[in-house]
Image: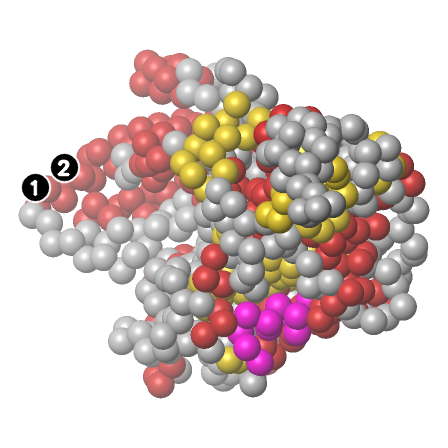
Amino acid sequence: MSGARGTRVVKSVGGAIGGLIGIVAMSVVAGVLVAASITPAIALGGMAANNSVEMFDNLPEYLEIGTLAEKSNVYAKDASGADVLLASFYAQNRVEVGWDDISPFVKDAVVASEDPRFYEHGGIDLLGTVRAAATTALRGDVQGGSSITQQYVKNVLVQKAEALSDPIERDAAYREATETTPERKVAEMRLAIGLEKEYPKNDILLGYLNIALFGGTVYGIEAAAKYYFGISARDLSLAQSAALIAIVNNPEKFRFDRPADEANPAAGGYPVTLDRRNYILGRMGLESKATPEQIAEAAATPVQPVITEPSTGCQTAGISAFFCDYVTWVIKNDDAFGASQDERDATFKRGGYQIYTTLDSELQTAAVSATDAWVPKSMANVNIGSASVSVEVGTGRILAMTQNKDYSNDPDVTGANYTSVNYSTDFGYGGSSGFQVGSTYKVFTLAEWLQEGRSLGESVDGTRRAYTTFRDSCEPDGVYYGESWNPGNDEGGNGGVTTALQATTGSINTSFAAMAQQLDLCGIRNTALAMGVHRADGNELQKYAPTILGTNEIAPLTMATAFAGFANKGTVCTPIAIDRIVDRSGADIAPPASECSQGMSEQVAATAGFALQQVMTGGTGAPSNPRTGIPHIGKTGTTDNALHTWMVGASTEVATATWVGNVTGFTSMRGFRLNGVNAGQVRHQIWPRIMRVADAKYGGSAFPAPERSLVEAPQEAVPEVTGQSPAAATARLKDLGFTVTIDPNRIPSDRPAGSVAQTNPPAGSRVSRGSAITLQISAGPSTPPPGG
């Protein structure tokens, strides 16, 4: 860059003479360099000249220009399927343009003011360099004198320094590129001459206009034109061109986007900028780059910016800000963009990528509207939160992601309605540590029940009782030993005998505890893992007994993904947020892809789906039924004390998870109302509103029919146990999968008193496995009446 900074240094005569000697010495070298570049065939006489040339020849000549930092853009789809900009990200606000995309006034202004002999010299303007050196030495004003090519070289080196991810290396490279020493200046000259040998003049000028700083984070003439005047660089007038070129001489001093700047205020017509602009206009007149009339008209034009703030960061993505934030974390966690998160973030903000996401703006709007209508952004006594996320079945594409907060990652923004934490995602993707999912987790016990060959029609004794051991193949001895666990039911009561299907539709805790007691705890956990379930905090998915009722903290996105797997015949596809990435050259870069795997058999998925459809038609999920004519599977979830409430479900095309609960704290959702509805039931207001839009847009079909053998309970013959002790009879019946009750009233029998007299149903009857068998105990032979 040109070096005029308005700095005045008072020097002694001796100091000025010493400085002049140093500068003159450098200028002698510069003269030799210029001579070498212009007339390389001329034999230069004298030892000094020979030494200077030798020194110069040993300096690096080649400068790799590389690519400029350019902003990356993130897009979503609107209702018509067109791409709409969500947000832009940049370390430097720059849009690189071609020669024909820049007004001729801009090109003439920069040459006339910064380097009038640009098209005549070979990279170094000797006259300008000597004049600037003399002024600096004698007057103390730090003066420019660098040619446009030299300024371009310096800017390229600065760009290379700023692109380094290591802060120590970056600072060192920046100092090396900007230090005010004769050595750096000579090296810069050498590189400038080498650059002129490689590139045409117009290419160098274009490169300079695309790389130059125009104040703040605005780089390049196109971004400057849009920022300061709201137009493209091709449309800049003479006055506007001169005003922008004024900035490059000293970006901090001459920028005109700070109306309250004491030195350059808007109230004074930006006088510092105005003076520099008019100087440039005068230079253009002297160089015959504009007519006197044009110069006069431009000089009479006030400096009047129309500042157009560029979109930057997810806070500009509006209702899609949290999804936008998730996209940035996808990039930061993808090794394809660098070896570390810092490097990936720098690549993202400098790489000029066009990122086309999976977000469906129409469904996103519906999700936001549903959330905003029912859950406030903040409350006085409850840190209330809500999140909903929808994914496409079979692809993992995230279609909507919203929550009840406004997005801000500014630490100075502390309002209760703001957060940068994405409630829908894992901690490693900008999210929270997750929320307990309650009874939505029962689907994995149901699936394991079916995978182990049990059926929906089997009876389960869900009578409330305490449990201390469970089968667990992950433990060394195959048994889980825990503290006594005596789960109750959400609606109270001690439970009783139900079928597995009834336990599912009614979400009966005691029945699921009894089912799990007959299964492998490790198998239940592994079924959840196979369906893509994991803890949001990154820790191992827990498997102690209470986890079957949903005590693991999991993100809504994970639950939506798992239910999409149930709806996809047991095939689960990892979620993705990006459809396509295009680099600055127009080449496609492979985005992180969804990975699909068979989490359970199609038969198990279909049968579980059969049960989960009944949850939506006549079970706990019925209040969320969208009633669009499209079938849905679903499961509700409510944690202890209703701290968290859930509704998760799917059509054959779209799965949605909705959570409403405490972000922090322990307030029961059943203890207050929102819009006249108990807060514990608000999930049933949000979920169907989202799914109605999803159903209308994506449709849905019938789910596969269940596997008959997994629906109907196997028939077992009641064994003959009469005459056995109640304990022995009970053990045998339970081994066959029956539940057992003992009639407290004894009956006369020829069997020994205290033994089993008979069973109900009687021995030999064929009944469903899991059915309840009642033991009637013998009172011994009846005593005949006297005289009988």
Residue positioned 63% across, 44% down in the render: 746
x, y percent for residue 190: 45, 28
Q: Main secondary structure of the magenta part?
A: helix
Q: Please tell me in which quadrant of the rendered image residue 630 appears.
A: bottom right
Extent of the magenta region: 677-687
Depth check, front residue: 201 or 487: 487
Residue hosting label 1: 14
Is residue 160 something that shows in the picture?
no
- Residue at 45% over, 74% down: 671
Residues tagged 2 and 1 counted as in contact (Cβ below 8 A) = yes
**Measured along the vertical axis of the image, is residue 200 above or below residue 211?**
above
User: Would residue 758 be found to the left or right of residue 91 on screen?
Assistant: right
**Residue located at (62% from left, 33% from top):** 753
Mark 1: amino acid? Gly
Secondary element type, mark 1: helix
In the picture shown, does residue 243 fall above or below 527? below
- As drawn, 762 above or below 567: above
Is residue 586 toward the left or the right of residue 191 in the image?
A: right
Where is residue 747? Give x, y as percent. Answer: 67, 44
